[in-house]
């Protein structure tokens, strides 16, 4: 038995270790397991947040032995875990890794999996707690959970053992398919067993939106329509298709980023204070915001959304091909790689405050940020000075690549006349808290292993996100774009995106680096 082995690590613990359990990864031969999941578990073990009574089972249709699986992950961990690899710790991991080569549709496999899990429970004292991570293509989500349930592997015993399933995105490809998937899952599992993961919620700064808003007395009183003019959320990427052309060409920027990551950013920015940090208290408030976003009519889709596709251009001094020249993308593809929109949240706090959103591939810089633009101060005091207009204050939550918060305000330019300049007060996380080794999945996997669903999407939240996006998909499908490509790689997207704000006398805030 291995359960009494001490974990050979020294670092400080900052939370309770996970429950004893087995993580079963479906689709374990893929990149996510090598690049993210295993390095995440390793980081958790290093921080003493992983139970010693732990094991991993990988399942995929790739033929390989358990030994080959371990070797494959070993090369991954060397590449992707932070810092030098601790050989003793990695040995500890290897001793509790198993691999099963099988088709996900093979019913017999689930019986064999059950037997393997029983053996693992005996060898590693994992107490019959299992969580199944579905890192597969979406058509397998429903069938896998059905088979797990049919084999009894989803059966919990209150207070004795738990069974959970983590589902990666995409969760549906429109409202109907998301509803159908929820229905299928909820026929064989309870909402408490389903962890719909959105890796954006694993990012420190995303979680920090709540701390920033609700742990400080000074911001919340002005976080509303009386003081805020509008909100901008930008998720700009410089990457192109990265061998994902065939997936992306079906999905497009809207489906790929908006119902999930961007809806999370909106709901955390706009939600009311929850009554506690209990999972459902937080998610209830998030869900209310998602339900309060006004779905656009067909006419509004035309006037309040913008889609774009990149042509060739230059990124960081290198020429890059246009979208239609990428691998696995049809030369006449009409898929959007950029989307911008103006949404309104129909509630007391946000009435008449536009939320402008944009996301795109191959943009000028990799930068995710939320800009809260405040109303301008009244001008009358400056009437007889050279000041022509007053700039608005902006609070910027920088999500990535650098994590931080900055506040822009006006200051007098030194000199004999009254002139104003914009200055920024900056806070960078790294300056205060240093950097923690992180893949971005640590908090999420740990939360699943301790049964905290706060950072996972509930069925109603997913569906509410799709309710916003589906009318856009419908109109766009009926009216294919005529002028693609319409922005050059390495720019801030199509001109129409700037026009969308300029029509309202507002402007995107861009961060070059
Ligand atoms: C994924 C999308 O969910 O998020 C990708 O499918 C996108 O297209 C990625 O590049 C962005 O994640 P991050 O963490 O790099 O901002």
Image: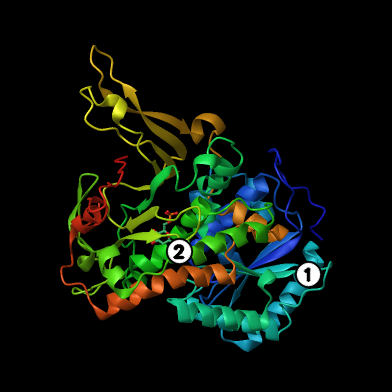
Residue drawn 31% across the image and 72% down it: 249
- Mark seen at residue 128: 1
Q: How is the image coloured?
A: rainbow
Q: Is residue 72 above or below residue 221?
A: below
Image coordinates of residue 496 in percent, x first then y, are 21, 58
Q: Nearer the viewer, mark 1 or mark 2?
A: 2
- Mark seen at residue 428: none
In front of the other: 31 or 395: 395
Mark 2 element type: loop
Residue drawn 57% across the image and 71% down it: 460
Q: Is residue 171 left or right of residue 38?
A: left
In front of the other: 428 or 240: 428
Q: Is residue 418 above or below residue 478?
A: above
Mark 1 element type: loop
Image coordinates of residue 341 in percent, x first then y, are 33, 60
In front of the other: 28 or 463: 463
Mark 1 neighbour density, 10 Å: few (under 14) some (14–19) many (20 or more):
many
């Amino acid at each position: 038995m291995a359960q009494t082995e001490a974990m050979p690590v020294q670092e400080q613990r900052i939370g309770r270790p996970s429950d004893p359990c087995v993580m079963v990864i479906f689709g374990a031969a893929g990149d996510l397991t090598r690049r993210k999941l295993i390095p995440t578990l390793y980081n958790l073990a290093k921080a003493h947040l992983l139970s010693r009574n732990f094991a991993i089972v990988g399942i995929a249709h790739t033929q390989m032995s358990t030994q080959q699986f371990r070797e494959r992950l070993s090369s991954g961990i060397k590449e992707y875990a932070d810092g030098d690899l601790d050989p003793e710790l990695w040995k500890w991991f290897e001793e509790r890794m198993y691999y099963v080569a099988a088709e996900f549709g093979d019913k017999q496999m689930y019986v064999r999996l059950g037997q393997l899990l029983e053996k693992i429970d005996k060898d590693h004292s994992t107490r019959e707690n299992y969580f199944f991570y579905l890192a597969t293509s979406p058509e397998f989500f429903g069938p896998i959970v059905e088979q797990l349930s049919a084999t009894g592997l989803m059966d919990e015993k209150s207070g004795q053992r738990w069974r959970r399933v983590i589902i990666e995105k995409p969760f549906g490809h429109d409202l109907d398919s998301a509803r159908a998937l929820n229905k299928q899952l909820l026929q064989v599992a309870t909402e408490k067993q389903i962890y719909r993961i959105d890796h954006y919620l694993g990012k420190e700064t995303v979680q920090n939106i709540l701390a920033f808003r609700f742990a400080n007395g000074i911001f919340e009183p002005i976080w509303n329509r009386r003081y805020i003019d509008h909100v901008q959320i930008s998720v700009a990427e410089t990457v192109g298709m990265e061998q994902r052309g065939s997936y992306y060409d079906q999905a497009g920027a809207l489906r790929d980023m908006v119902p999930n990551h961007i809806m999370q950013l909106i709901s955390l920015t706009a939600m009311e204070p929850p009554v506690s940090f209990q999972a459902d208290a937080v998610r209830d408030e998030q869900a209310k915001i998602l339900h309060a976003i006004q779905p656009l009519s067909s006419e509004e889709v035309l006037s309040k959304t913008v889609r774009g596709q990149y042509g060739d251009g230059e990124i960081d001094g290198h020429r890059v091909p246009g979208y239609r020249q990428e691998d696995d993308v049809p030369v006449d593809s009409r898929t959007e790689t950029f989307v911008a929109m103006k949404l309104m949240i129909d509630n007391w706090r946000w009435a008449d405050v536009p939320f402008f959103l944009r996301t795109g591939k191959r943009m000028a810089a990799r930068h995710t940020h939320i800009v809260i633009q405040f109303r301008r101060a009244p001008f009358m005091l400056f009437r007889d000075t050279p000041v022509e207009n007053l700039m608005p204050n902006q609070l910027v939550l920088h999500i990535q690549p650098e994590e931080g918060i900055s506040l822009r305000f006006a200051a007098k330019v030194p000199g004999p006349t009254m002139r104003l300049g914009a200055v920024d007060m900056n806070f960078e996380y790294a300056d205060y808290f240093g950097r923690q080794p992180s893949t971005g999945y640590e908090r999420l996997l740990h939360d699943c292993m301790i049964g905290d669903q706060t950072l996972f999407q509930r069925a109603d939240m997913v569906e509410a996100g799709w309710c916003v996006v589906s009318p856009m998909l419908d109109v766009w499908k009926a009216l294919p774009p005529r002028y693609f490509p319409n922005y050059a790689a390495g720019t801030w997207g199509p001109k129409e995106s700037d026009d969308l704000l300029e029509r309202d006398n507002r402007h995107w805030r861009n961060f070059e680096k």
